[in-house]
Amino acid sequence: MRDFIVGLLEVIGIVVIITAVAYIGTSIEKASDNEKYNNGECYYCEHGHYELINVQRQHGNIYYFYKCNNCNIIIELNSNIEMQAL
């Protein structure tokens, strides 16, 4: 019985660690996306504004592509910044 409890606690510990790492990774990714999106103002030319031009789903991930209406640079984000603002 003691071995069962120890094994169960190990599994629970592993699940908690995996969940924490995933949460931290997601938080870092969102922070990076917020920095790239720059409140919709183009980080590169500083004059244009980003417009959503495409959304793709690959291997369970969703990618959002935004294009600057001034310099035409395209950025790829892993979160939909515009939807988070609503």
Image (cartoon, rainbow, N blue to C red):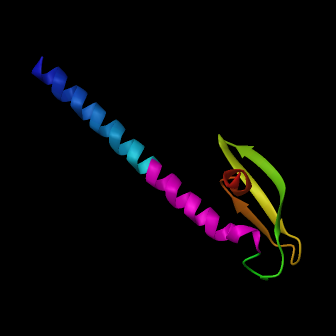
At 69% from the left and 47% from the top, the residue drawn is 62
Up the image or down, 4 lies above or below 61; here it is: above
**Magenta residue check for 84:** no
Up the image or down, 57 lies above or below 64; here it is: above
Question: Quadrant of the image for the N terminus?
Answer: top left
Q: Position of residue 14 (x, y in %)?
A: 31, 39
Determine the residue located farthest toward the top in the rendered image.
Answer: 1
Q: Position of residue 28 (x, y in %)?
A: 51, 60
57 with respect to 53 (left or right): left
At 39% from the left and 43% from the top, the residue drawn is 18
Residue 4 found in image quarter: top left
52 with respect to 9 (left or right): right
In magenta, the rendered stretch is: 23-41
Q: Position of residue 53 (x, y in %)?
A: 86, 57
84 with respect to 3 (left or right): right
- Which residue is more in the foreground, 60 or 31? 31
Q: Main secondary structure of the magenta part?
A: helix
Q: Position of residue 57 (x, y in %)?
A: 73, 44
At 69% from the left and 59% from the top, the residue drawn is 77
Residue 24 found in image quarter: bottom left
